[in-house]
Image (spheres, rainbow, N blue to C red):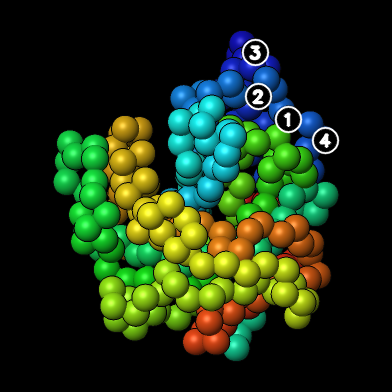
Amino acid sequence: MEELPIGDPADIAGRFLAARRAAAPLADYPGCQPVDLTEAYRIQDHAIAGWGHEVIGWKVGRVLPPLSDTLGTERLAGPIFAATGAATGEAVAMPVFSGGFAAGEAEFLLRIGAVPPAGQTRFSLDEAAALIDAVHVGIEIASSPLATINALGPLVVISDFGNNNGLVIGPAVPDWRTSGFEQWDVTTLIDGMAVGRGQAAAFPDGAIGSARFLFELMAVRGIALRPGQWISSGAIGGVHDARAGQRVEADFGGRFSVACDLIEAQPDRA
């Protein structure tokens, strides 16, 4: 079989997947870094197809100035393949890549209740909210075999599953439409020490703005969304490095808390 050139999107995706399957760190980006959003999402598309597991949701992350101006977007997206439920006061084990990048991020998780209308490429906030049937508290596990993934920027993040390696799904927010959850003070703690605080309302158009972004992006990419899939709406209080052996906890205004113990990812023996 002819060997793919090192800058080929399928080759880059394959090298990331091989590192994930082996739970082995990557010393450098595995090829030529993507130069625009189209190329970054093309690599992601190859990776999703090559991974072969069910996409149970999508993470949405921030793109901050000045790169947001350069790239023409304030957000990025990546697939989520695994999720674990957790009750308040319970800590669940979540794998991260030793020698790579790892973080746990406090986030609101939006569950898709209805499929976006076919052919619709623009959504108002009200239209986006109407497609959501539940909001939960949770933690996104950001992890990649590439330790420098965040430092290399959003295009590199997009190309490796958006730097996602799982989701911790906590309790549902009762009456979320009237709860004012986007104004709740949210705190991220690592080993009991507060490392970040914030509100979802600080995001452009809040957590629902992340849903709107995803609906519009998926329409452009031609990817069908399904009821029951999750939208991890963005790190509240920032992204803070962690490692296997540490506990990450997210406190949602004293109303709910979710925790996970980070463990070292193991090679995929399947």
Q: Is mark 2 on a helix, strand or loop?
A: loop
Q: Which of marks 3 and 4 is nearer the N terminus?
A: 3
Q: Of the two numbered discs 3 and 2 on the same chain, state the one appearing first in sequence.
A: 3
Residue 86 appears in the rendering:
no
Q: Relative to the observer, which residue lies in front, 9 or 64?
A: 64
Q: Tell me the distance, in whole angstroms, between the alpha carbons under discs 3 and 2.
A: 13 Å
Circle 1/circle 2 CB separation < 8 Å: yes
Kindly report the distance in space between the C-alpha atoms of the residues bearing marks 3 and 4: 19 Å
User: Which residue position holds label 4?
Assistant: 27
The N terminus: image quadrant = top right
Q: Name the secondary structure under disc 3.
A: loop
Q: Nearer the viewer, mark 3 or mark 2?
A: 2
Q: Along the horizontal axis of the image, is 58 left or right of 101?
A: left
The residue where tag 2 is placed is 33
Sooner in the amino-acid sequence: mark 2 or mark 4:
4
Q: Give the residue displayed 27% in from the left and 54% down from the top.
A: 125
Residue 241 vs 253, above or below: the answer is above
Per the model, the C-alpha gap separating discs 1 and 2 is: 7 Å
Amino acid type of disc 1? Tyr
Mark 1–mark 3 Cα distance, whole angstroms, equals 14 Å
* Residue at x-position 31% and y-position 41%: 216
Residue 5, disc: 3
Q: How far apart are marks 2 and 4 (CA)?
A: 14 Å
Question: Which residue: 67% across, 67% down?
Answer: 196
Instruction: Answer left or right for 165 relative to 95.
Output: left
Q: Which of marks 1 and 3 is nearer the N terminus?
A: 3
Residue that carries the numbered disc 1 in the rendered image? 29
Image quadrant assignment for residue 142 = bottom right
Whether residue 39 appears in this view of the structure is yes
Q: How far apart are marks 1 and 4 (CA)?
A: 7 Å
